[in-house]
Image: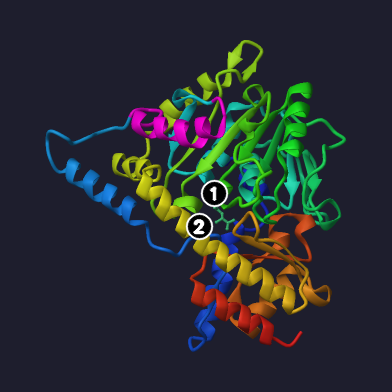
Amino acid sequence: MFKLNDNYLKLPGSYLFSTIGKKVSAYSAAHPDKRIIRLGIGDVTQPLAPAIIQALHRAVDEMGKAETFRGYAPDLGYEFLRSAMAENDYKAKGCDISADEIFVSDGAKCDSGNIQEIFSLDNRIAVCDPVYPVYVDSNVMAGRTGTYDPSTEMWSDVIYMPCTAANNFAPQIPKETPDLIYLCFPNNPTGATVTKAQLQEWVDYANKVGAVIIYDAAYEAYISEPDVPHSIYECEGARTCAIELRSFSKNAGFTGVRLGCTVVPKDLKCGDTALHGLWARRHGTKYNGAPYIVQRAGEAVYSEEGKAQLKEQVAYYMKNASYIYKGLKEAGFTVSGGVNAPYIWLKTPDGMTSWEFFDYLLENANVVGTPGSGFGPSGEGYFRLTAFGSYENTVEAVDRIKAMKL
Ligand code: MLT
């Protein structure tokens, strides 16, 4: 008789955004006359930029001719895309990362869930609390997190680094020593950032204790302040302790197109073994590459027109972020984020729990957000709104929230 991977049975509830989706569908079915505005999941709403659409069309045409047709992509991604990334995302920012250290994938979500596979099961992970749920859940599935305590909503073998108003939503070096440290800046869900000097402390710490930092830079395009690093490789010594995840979802609207990458520097080693080789082996065995047409679309992100168009797109969403931030502040909410990130993090009013406020907002304003507690126990009493809606919907949502009786 077959047996299950019973680590899956330890997972409490369903994936956060699936739970929210079900709740919203049920509300919508019961109230078909209500126009719901979704500022929950961080999914983009603006169409792909013209430079990207043109690149997609060209690549589709190539696939229709025998001379230019392409089959399987190279294991680690097409050279044209990896070079464009190395040049623009890294060399241009003074980071020493070469094209052959970049592994193209179908997105940062998969990579952030899969990267743990190359590490031993007895590694201790440290995560920010609140945190993007994929980092924890994928380690639960692997059997690395111990037992779950429903009363604290914590796993026995996970090191939680609380990110609260008291520390400006920036994690502190934990008392226990982790082996793997997940960091995401600009942060999902709080929208907080760290300075380059603060990130340097993490790099120094990881190198000192022999830990690996898994750095999720999915939101770097939203950085507006000068002292906030766009990549962990801006820090001295990061090549020997950090893996970086990149996404095309938020900077270029590829949530439905799917493209991302993982950077594994060749200097990152466990004894004599380079992690680069392990990830290459994993990629080669389990993955057949992002589609050619999508990688061409990714290349267009780095063209002059692409860069200009995407700058406008990011500015469009950041105008929403600023509208939400200011509107909620005027309405008396305690708000943070929204300056270097497309997420606004607010304190729920009147001591409501995060889920109570979710229900209240859905019923009274027909606006969907994300309960902070869904990201971890320190998210309780907080709520996340995304700036990825249309401007019109964003304005209406804020007006509806302001009009709510609290
Ligand atoms: C979010 O809402 O947190 C994001 O959409 C998650 C993701 O990018 O997978």
Snapshot quadrant of residue 120: top right
Q: Are marks 1 and 2 in contact (CB under 8 Å)?
A: yes
- Does the residue tagged 1 have its C-beta within 8 Å of any atom of ligand 1? no
Count of residue discs: 2
Quarter of the image with the C terminus is bottom right
Residue 116 vertical placement versus 311 (above, below): above
Q: Does the stretch in magenta take in 382?
A: no
Write the residue at 58% across / 27% down: 118
Residue 100: percent from the left, percent from the top? Answer: 45, 23
Residue labelled with disc 1:
221
Tell me if mark 1 has few (under 14), some (14-19) or many (20+) residues whose alpha carbon lies within 10 angstroms of its own.
many
Predominant SS along the magenta part = helix
Taking the image as shown, residue 126 lies to the left or right of residue 1, namely right
Quadrant in which residue 20 is drawn: bottom right
Q: Is residue 359 left or right of residue 250?
A: right
Residue name at image x 77 percent, y 52 percent:
169
Amino acid identity at mark 2: Val
Q: Which residues are magenta?
A: 74-96
Query: In this figure, which residue is indicated by the disc labeled 2?
Result: 314
SS type, badge 2:
helix
Location of residue 307 in the rendering, given as x and y in whole percent from the top left corner: 42, 48
Query: Is 138 positioned to the left or the right of 50 in the image?
Result: right
The picture quadrant where one finds residue 112 is top right
